[in-house]
Image (spheres, rainbow, N blue to C red):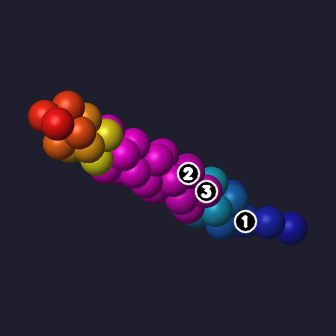
Amino acid sequence: MVHPADALVERVLTVMSEGFQFIDIIFFAMIAAFLVLRLRGVLGRR
């Protein structure tokens, strides 16, 4: 039998790991957007 508290802890950890995945995606998207804007600025000057 699974203890309710154990199930809760497992659920919280799952949500946290999904949350960190979401933060990672946002973080990499920001870096990608920054690089695109920098390249556009550099290549646009030629």
Mark 2 sits on what residue?
Answer: 18
Mark closer to the observer (1, 2): 2
Q: Which mark is residue 3?
A: 1
Mark 1 nearby-residue class (10 Å; few <14, some 14–19, many ≥20) = few
Q: Amino acid at mark 2?
A: Glu
**Lateral position of residue 6 relative to residue 36, left or right:** right
Mark 3 sits on what residue?
Answer: 14
Residue furthest to the top: 44
Residue 12 shows up from this direction:
no
C-alpha gap between disc 3 and disc 1? 17 Å
**Residue at figure coordinates x 56%, y 51% from the top left:** 18
Q: Which residues are magenta?
A: 13-33
Instruction: Give the quarter of the image for residue 30.
Output: top left
Q: Amino acid at mark 1?
A: His
**Residue at figure coordinates x 31%, y 40% from the top left:** 36
Residue 41 at x, y percent in the picture: 17, 36
Q: Are marks 2 and 3 in contact (CB under 8 Å)?
A: yes
SS at circle 1: loop
Q: Amino acid at mark 3?
A: Thr
Mark closer to the observer (2, 3): 2
SS at circle 2: helix
Residue furthest to the left: 45
**Residue at figure coordinates x 46%, y 47% from the top left:** 25
SS at circle 3: helix
